[in-house]
Image: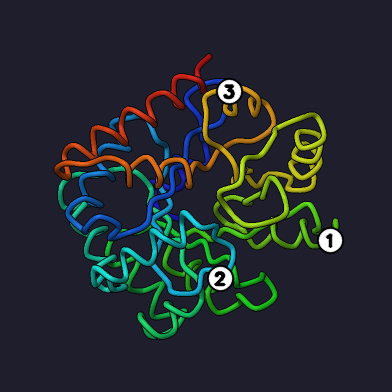
Amino acid sequence: MTGRMKALLAAPSPGPGPGIAPYITAGDGGLERTLAVLHGLERGGAVCVELGLPFSDPLADGPALQAAAQRSLEAGTTPDATLEVIRSYRDQGGKLPILLFSYSNPLWVGLGGLRASAERLAEAGGDGFVVPDLPPEEADELCAACDELDLGTVFFATPRSSIERIRSAARASSGFLYAIGRVGVTGLRTSFDDEVLDWLDFVRELAGNTPLAVGFGVAEPADIRALAGHTDLAICGTALVNHLHNTAGTPEDAAASAQALVTRLSQATRD
C-alpha cells in the first residue's frame, strides 16, 4: 500500500471515535470545485476521502448520490478528468489518502480495464479502490494489480452477508472492510442502536486485523459518538453531498462549507 494508506491503517482515528472518511462525487459542481473541496476536507480533519467516479446507473446509491452523479455527467466529467483532479490535488500538496469509488463499468469502459485502471490511479496519486459491484471472488485481477502497485482494496459486508462472506471480504480487503449499516441504498438515515452496534462488533471480530469502516446513514456528530469503539472509520456521503449541493458561491466557498461540516464530525471523534 502507499505510505498514506499505511499511515491511515496504522492510526485511523485521532481520538476515541472513528476517523472521518467523507465521500464526494467528482465533478459535482465542477472539477475546480471538487479540487477545492478536497483541500477543505483535509483542513477539516478528514482522514481519507472516497472520490466517486460518476456513473449513469449507480445501483447502490440513493437519490442524492444518483443526482450528484447525473449533474457531474451532464457537466462533462470523465474518468480521465477525475484522475486529473487527484493529480492536481497531489501537485498542490494534498496529503489525504484518496480511494476511487467506482462501479465496474467506468473502469472497463472509461479507463481500459481493471489493471489499466489501477496503473492509471497509481500514476495519478490515488491510494486504492472501492468497487461496490465487484465481489471478492471476481476481483483477482484488480487485487493482483493493486498489490503490485501498492494500492488498497475495499470490499463490503452487509447485514445479509454470511460469516464466510464477511471473512472472505475482510481477507480480500488490503485497505479496510466496508460495513454497510443497513440493507438498502445510500441516503436513508440509520439508527445506530444496540442491534446495529452489536452487528458491527460481530463484523469487527470476524474481520480480524482488517480495519472496519461503516457507511450508509452517517450524518451527525451524534452518529460519530454512537459509533465510538465499534468501528475504525465512519463514511459520510449523502449528508456531505447534499450539504455541498446546497452551498452556493465559489469553489472556495464550497471548500469552507465542507471544512465546517467535517470539522463538526471530527470534533465528535475526539469527544
Residue displayed at 33% across by 30% down: 44
Of pointers 2 and 1, the one earlier in the residue sequence: 2
C-alpha span from label 1 to label 3: 32 Å
Q: Which mark is residue 221?
A: none
> Could you say whether the residue bearing mark 1 is in a helix, strand or loop?
helix
> Could you say whether the residue bearing mark 2 is in a helix, strand or loop?
helix
Q: Which mark is residue 143?
A: 2
Q: Nearer the viewer, mark 1 or mark 3?
A: 3
Q: Nearer the viewer, mark 3 or mark 2?
A: 3
> Could you say whether the residue bearing mark 3 is in a helix, strand or loop?
helix
Of pointers 3 and 2, the one earlier in the residue sequence: 2
Q: Nearer the viewer, mark 2 or mark 1?
A: 1
Q: Position of residue 163 (x, y in %)?
A: 85, 56
Question: In the rendered image of this protein, does residue 136 appear above or below residue 154?
Answer: below
Q: Is residue 227 visible?
A: yes
Q: Position of residue 129 (x, y in %)?
A: 48, 62
Q: Are marks 2 and 1 in contact (CB under 8 Å)?
A: no
Q: Which mark is residue 164?
A: 1
Q: Is residue 213 visible?
A: no
Tell me: 215 left or right of 45: right
C-alpha span from label 3 to label 2: 35 Å
Tell me: 103 left or right of 42: right
Q: Is the residue marked by circle 3 packed among few (<14), some (14-19), or many (20+) residues within 10 Å?
A: few
Residue displayed at 50% across by 58% down: 152
Of pointers 1 and 3, the one earlier in the residue sequence: 1
From the image, tell me which residue sits under label 3. Answer: 222
Q: Residue furthest top?
A: 271
C-alpha span from label 2 to label 1: 19 Å
Question: In the rendered image of this protein, does residue 141 appear above or below residue 143?
Answer: below
